[in-house]
Amino acid sequence: MYLYKATCPDIPNPKQKTSRSQGGGQGGVQAQGPGQGRLARQTSVGTGAQPYNPMMLWTANKNNGVTAIKQLEEFLNFHSLSLHEAVRCQTGMLYRNLGKSGLRVSCLGLGTWVTFGGQIADEVAEQLMTIAYESGVNLFDTAEVYAGGRAEVILGNIIKKKCWRRSSLVITTKLYWGGKAETERGLSRKHIIEGETFRRAQIRLLSLTTNAKHLLCVSGLKGSLQRMQMEYVDVVFANRPDSNTPMEEIVRAMTYVINQGMAMYWGTSRWTAMEIMEAYSVARQFNLIPPVCEQAEYHLFQREKVEVQLPELYHKIGVGAMTWSPLACGIITGKYENGIPESSRASMKSYQWLREKIVSEDGRKQQAKLKELNHIAEKLSCTLPQLAVAWCLRNEGVSSVLLGTSNPEQLTENLGAIQVLPKMTSHIVSEIDHILGNRPYGKKDYRS
């Protein structure tokens, strides 16, 4: 077989190494350092002979941090870009990888549970998304069951109205509860994939008609895409485990929607560590796509799963954590200290369980602990909600924290947790753990 042998004049001939270094031989060529041959030839031709190549500067002096940044800026300027025009430089937002995938998500995301299509008007929803997007938030989460599908419609309408680049957004949705029929719920291949086709004019009409909510209950990922007027979502979540569907069928269906371009990644929500591990094992056994993320509840009073179970999954199989309810459905804000306000979530009929939780014995103990945590918040010059969100973000295993707010003031306040995060020292965290008294212990703690 004929093998092509590449030649490069920059690579010195080992046989001539001694003669070159000593200046001997017929040519009397002096030794050159690594990577200097081509640079020497270009500079010897003259200043105007070669066009400016910023990559030459990019590879030089890598160990000098200041020089490297200047060289990177020159490289970007050469391509009509700017390092200071990046979103993170303008807004101060932090971005993290979703698990061990390459998807970069803002550490704070905006959720649509309860609020979109229910607790707030469409105009307020647009204000919230605008504030979030202009603050550097790129993650927006919804589900087919939220407001019977209306939340997805509102989300899609706002994105289309704002003309935001789809490539700048990370849109996630969740599947399980799709409709009243037996085949419109669960994680069967049929429910995950299928969905009825709506014309866009119908979608606009449904977004304005409150009496047509039953028409929005269209199951499956295709139905969600139709409601949001999108070709794909970035992450599709299995909203809860399904004991009636074999794990292989679930993983194969999720792999199918990814291969068909309807989703980029898939994840789980409210799954146990054992169920996530089973899905990963099935994916590896049949050469399918495993989940990259688990959505889990995480706040000051709910810690076990995110702090003990998920870190082990992250290190073993790369599954990250996207957490929700950082303020425990508003309990941590302190607004329930003197009763239940009329406009609060706990006052809604469908949230009777939250009302009972607040007035219970455990609820009263939590309110007492929140009063003590207020002193720490005052010491850090922040509010209690900002402290609670920053406390969630201080966990490096958390890829993003989903915020659920009902007005622009709340959202602006919660986004301010980014400035509190650097103040979350080990001493402050220890103080919080001492007040809460609920720090979970993992395997490492038991060994020590």
Image: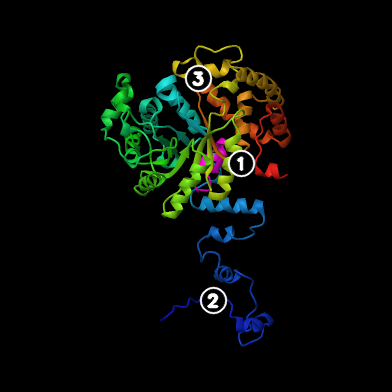
- Horizontal and vertical percent position of residue 3: 44, 79
- Horizontal and vertical percent position of residue 341: 53, 12
**Which residue is under mark 1?**
396
Residue 142 highlighted magenta (yes or no): no
Q: Is residue 83 left or right of residue 23?
A: left
Q: Nearer the viewer, residue 307 or 378?
A: 307
Outermost residue on the bottom side: it is 26
Query: Which label's residue is closer to the chain start, 3 or 2?
Result: 2
**Which residue is under mark 3?**
353
Q: Secondary structure at mark 2?
A: loop
Residue 120 seen by the camera: no
Q: Nearer the viewer, residue 413 or 47?
A: 413
- Horizontal and vertical percent position of residue 357: 55, 19
At label 1, which amino acid type do we have? Glu
Segment tinted magenta in the rendering: 88-107
Name the colour scheme: rainbow
What is the C-alpha distance between the residues marked 1 and 2? 48 Å
Circles 1, 2 touching at the beta carbon (< 8 Å): no
Tally the numbered discs.
3
The N terminus lies in which quarter of the figure? Answer: bottom left
